[in-house]
Structure formats: structure tokens, C-alpha cells
Image (spheres, helix red, strand yellow):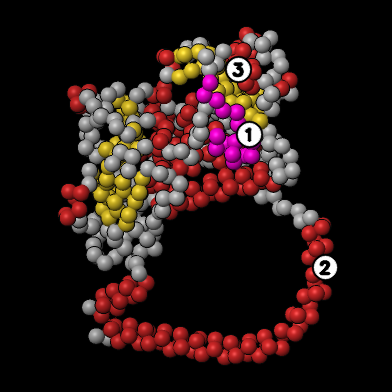
Amino acid sequence: MKFVLSSLFLNTLIGTAFSENNKGCVSTFEQDVDYFPEKIEVEKSEHWTITYENSYKVLKNTDAALSYLLYQCGTDVPQGEISKHNVTIPIPLPDDFGLHYTTFIPFMELLGKRGHISSMYGSPSWVYSPCLSSIIDDDRVTFIGNLNNQTLIDELQVNVSTPYFVGVGTPNIFPNNFEISEWKETSMLGILEWLKFFSVFFNMEKEANEIFKQVEDRVNCASENADIITADKPKPVVLWGSYSDYCGGWDVARSCPNYYCELATTCDATLLTSMDGSIDASQCYRNYMTTEEFVEYGKDADVWIYSGASDGIDTILTKYGGELGDFKSIKNSEVYDISGQTMDGWYGVRLVEPDALIQDFCKVVGNESPAVVTPHQLIFLRHLNDPVASKPVCTDTNAPYVKLASECSRIIPVVEDSESHSEDSHDHNKSEAENSKSHSEDSELESHSDDAHDDCSSSKKMLSAIILIVVSLALI
């Protein structure tokens, strides 16, 4: 009893009995204990929220108007809260779960949960991750053609109680399903921040916070460097466009916000955008440009990023070489496509690599730091003359996901000489005034020092009193 009373009192003083989130179940439930000392805050995302109580979390997908009650395994279920939420489930989640979209895979890999994916929607051929593909080859992942087909799921022997992460609005028979709306975010960091959303189910807020902070810092570093580099020169102009045989015309960057607009803004470039086009491609739900319209639109751009398939740009330059001959970007060999990680990689991991893509873009528009020790090597963007990438090979299925971005070194702005001389000219004028103040400041400093001594003495007395209270309780 002596120990319990004193420890509870100390817990009250400290504010929590744990220094980190529990990755398993707790053995004893204490109502006044904060079981989630490591928390997250939503900074960039627009479509989800989270609130913390001592033993449970309330996670909401505001886009889908859904609420999830997640309580720490081993604690009492908050009975009064259950009716307010769509799903109530203990956390951290068990060792297996399911995924709907392949774009969710790298989020789970970043959290070290690759080996816990037990089932997925679709086909193994849709998976880009080389290490997950190896796991699939070992028959450790079950693929489901229809998440809403009870008979099929029973035949595949998939447990319907398996927690499932699904795209927003997806019909399915899994009662413990959690809808994801990452694609509705308007910024790349907003999309990446869904990593924090996923982390909440595993009590991995600390890990998600660290990853997000590192990515955000690299993005900010690239942006700050680009601002300095372009301060005294015109911004490069970028054409983002490709040809579609199916739609019968040229597609270009349209309205903002969009990720390509964010790339240009971050790297201090001017992105050409247009909603024009005389080809009414109803099958593609928008207008497309004719070749003549596209030439007039993009011929003066400094850089052309071809946003179609990797085998498309060579074919297009051969087929339309005559019409595109006046393109400034072609003449200056400033043509790139998006196949640096293969097209599967572009769609498969780009969402968790905003820093790498931004570094790519800044490099191709000439706004990468010139003083960097190790220049960034293109990851997603590929120069027309470089070979087309092949899918990476996995050597260890348990290896952690390795981020693709380069380390970013900030440029130190050079102070202009004129500014330095201006500051020197004021030094003599300031000196007499500063000297005249010194005597009075010294006397005030002596007075403040006495006050600080008194404050320190008072703080020591208060600490001594607290210690005496703890000791007294321990003797009860």
C-alpha cells in the first residue's frame, strides 16, 4: 500500500505512467493513466481528425463522415462511447489486416507492416513493391476479386473479422473496415500525412511523426533553396503534357491545386496550365488539344515533362517530330518523362515520396543547390536519353522501406557588401549611446540578480515541500 500510494502520487505529478505508446496489450487498467503519451497532430491533411482520451482515441474520416473508436487493448471498453462511432476496435491491431488499394502498400511498409498484410483486393500483377511481391510468391497473401462477395471470401477462407483498409465508399462485407480518402487531399504533404492516420491503429505515432518531419524538412529545404537561386533570374517555364491515342489528342496540366502545380510552386518554376482544347473527348470526360494547338501552347517552354507511358515519348517524337521541331525544350535536350521508377513505380510509391519528386523537379528546372556535395540523382523523372528503369529486386522481405529522397543542404544566403557597409556606418553613432546606458544597466543587472536569487530560493523550497509530501505518503 505504501508503494502504490506514493507511485500514484508521482504519476499525478509527472502526468503519465508511460513514456511511449504500448505496442501490445496492457496487463492492468488504471483509469487515470494516459496510455498514449506519443500523439500526433493533423498539420496538412484536410480530411481527417483525431482526439485522445486516456485509454482510447477517436479517429474520424471527415470526408466519409465516419468515426472510429480505438481503445487500448487490455483496458475497459468505453461503453458510453460505442454508439457514437461506426467501428469500435482494440488497438494495436492484430498481426494481420487487409488492403484494398495497392497505393496503401508503401504507407504500411514505412511503418514496418509489410509482413502483416494477409489479404488484398485485385491481382498480384498490380503490386509494385518487390518485397511484397516476394511474400506474395510464397502464398502468404490472399487476393480477393470482390470485397463484397460473401461466397467468394468464404471460399478463399479469409476471416471477415480481419481489419480492412478500403477506399472511401467501397462496398465490402468486412465489419472492421476503415475508409481512406488520401487521394482527395490537395497537397502532397497532405497525402503523406495519412501515414499518421494509419499509424494510429498500431500505436506508432512516434514513428509516423519522425518520418513526416524528415520529409517536410527536405521539402522546405528544396523550396528555400529554389527561392534563393531564382531571386535574380527569370523562372523556368515547364510544359506538362502527353498524347493519348485513346482520347485522340494532347493532354496538358489543367487547373490548380494539383500535384504538378505544387511541384512548380515549390521549385520556383512557371507551369503552363490550360483547360482549352478543340477535341471533345467525351470518353475521357474533357477536352484535348490538337497537335497544332499543342505546338502553339508549348513550343516556348524551357522544360517538357512527358506525363504519359515510358514507351510513348520516343514514339511521339518519331511520329510528330516535324510538327514538334520548333520546341525549345527539344532543341535544348530538356525533355523528361515519369518512368524513372517504371510506370508502376510512379503510381505505386509516388504518394509517400513527395520529397524525392520535388527534388527531381527542382533539378530538371535548374533550381537545385549548386553547392551540394552529392548532387541529387533523378528518381521518378527520367531524361529522354537515359535508359528506362526496371523494377527493383528484393533481397530481404523483412528489410525496412528505404526512402528515395536525397539529403538536402540549405544554401546560406550571401550578405551584400553594401548592407555590411551600411551597418558599419551606424556603429560609431551607436557606441556613445550604448556606453551612456552601460552604468545604469549595470546597476539594474545587480538588482535583477538579487531578484533571481530570491526566485531560485523560493523554487528550491517548493521542491523540498513536494519531496516531503511524497515521503510522508510513503510512510503511511
The residue indicated by pointer 2 is: 425
The residue indicated by pointer 3 is: 294
- Amino acid type shown at disc 2: Ser
Residue 294: which quarter of the image?
top right
The residue indicated by pointer 1 is: 270
Of callouts 2 and 1, the N-terminal one: 1
What are the residue bounds of the magenta stretch? 261-276
Q: Are marks 1 and 3 in contact (CB under 8 Å)?
A: no
Of callouts 3 and 2, the N-terminal one: 3
Relative to 9, does residue 145 appear above or below in the rendering? above
Relative to 384, does residue 62 appear above or below in the rendering? below
Instruction: Measure the alpha-carbon separation of dots 1 and 3.
Output: 17 Å
Relative to 436, does residue 423 appear above or below in the rendering? above
Of callouts 1 and 3, the N-terminal one: 1
Q: Is 263 inside the magenta-drawn segment?
A: yes
Residue 270: which quarter of the image?
top right
